[in-house]
Amino acid sequence: MQHIGERIIFHVDVNSAFLSWSALKKLQEEPGSVDLRTIPSAVGGDVKTRHGIITAKSIPAKKYGIKTGEPVVKALQKCPDLVLVPSDFETYRRYSHALMDLLLSYTPLLQQMSVDEAFLDVTGRIPSGDRQSAVRLAGRIRGEVFSTLGFTVNVGISTNKLLAKMASDFSKPDQTHTLFPDEIPDKMWPLPIGDLYGCGSATAEKLTSAGIRTIGEAAAADPAALQAMLGEKAGLYIANSANGIGSDHVNPVKEQAKSISNETTLVHDIGQGNYKTDGLPVIRKLSEKVASRLAKAGLFGQTVTFQVKTSDFQRYSRQMSLPDPTADARQIEEAALLLAGRLLTAPDGLFPAGMTIRLIGVGVSKLSEAQARQMDLFTWAKEKEVREMHKKAGESAREKQEKLDAMLQSVNTRFGNGRLKKGMGGKKNNS
């Protein structure tokens, strides 16, 4: 059946991208070795220490309930035989570029969303409104990706980007799914509200607690009530998205982010007494999330920012520039800990002044696609020393900060001021 005049948008998404690409590299380097995609395996964290978070998983690992973003330790509890492999950003970039080049051969209207996904406007490649032709074209794309590059993709098809993205997230791997407006009641509305693209876990929890458990229930809800519950902007987004309303404009110009950051509002305020037990794990988790987003975008950052919001809703921040760009969670965490020490626990910090914090944020800026990491032996040795410092049992957070400060001073003394720089963001009201 033809639907004259409608646009046809594809969302192409690599199945378990980082894991698939790591598996292909291993097969190339070790012919005859086991394909990581066929066993419980995952990319994430420090493979030797088994710390960090899962950034990608195989389909067999998913059957154990392993989730992207969860701690490696928790994943290993679910599946003790889980095979872990380290991140390999250079391999990810190589396969990503190859994929985008292939997709561009089908249409110049390509909007890359991350290293492993893109929107394509293929309206001009098929007879007007011919949905079956669109499905066949998606099948050709999937077949060519697998035959030439060795990995699989899902393709979602619809008339706008929101619905195409939703469709590509249906059953995996190596599938084509449609989600046209007339298919919304059957295919989208029965899904849990948390499955709606752009509906985060906190928003989904609020909606569920209010009795809105499915996307269909959100679609039927009064938009004004959603706005009263979630805020004007978020409420309108949920109302529109649940009804399949989204943009059909595919922008072929890749817009590079200026910064990547994550922040979280704390369950309870943190002060001097509970900073070590409650604050340090939050900084680690936020650093890992930022690193994961950098990897997803194929970027590296050189300036690390640490910020907090105090219990009286004042924001404070500190920042410093690293010698070289990084996407490594541990390096981001180490810089954030140093900045946190200066802002919070130093003699002139917030904690000695009797203040407590209700929000913590970690971010990176000065982003680049090339790592350009040319580390001299001295810097490498100092970084290794910092890592070893974190392993010592019984060492307090304050002692870590003092030693890190001393190391920074040592680097600046030897190589000149500015080798490692720190900055400071001022205080501003944010009620």
Image (cartoon, rainbow, N blue to C red):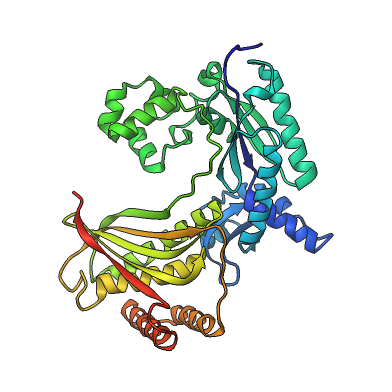
Q: Identify which residue, 1 or 85, lies in the foreground.
A: 1
In the image: residue 407, left or right of residue 378: left
- Residue sitting at x 31%, y 21%: 222
* Picture coordinates of residue 3, whole percent (x, y): 60, 12
* Quarter of the rendering containing residue 355: bottom left
What residue is rendered at 20% in x and 63% in y? 356
- Name the residue at the right extreme: 32
- Choose between 312 and 149: the one closer to the eye: 149
**Residue 133 or 71: which is nearer the viewer?**
133
On the image, the x and y values in percent for residue 316 come to: 24, 62
Figure check: 122 above or below 112: above
Is residue 211 something that shows in the picture? no
Snapshot quadrant of residue 322: bottom left
- Residue 31 in sight: yes
Q: In which quadrant of the rendered image does the N terminus lie?
A: top right
Report the residue at 54% width, 50% height from top: 67
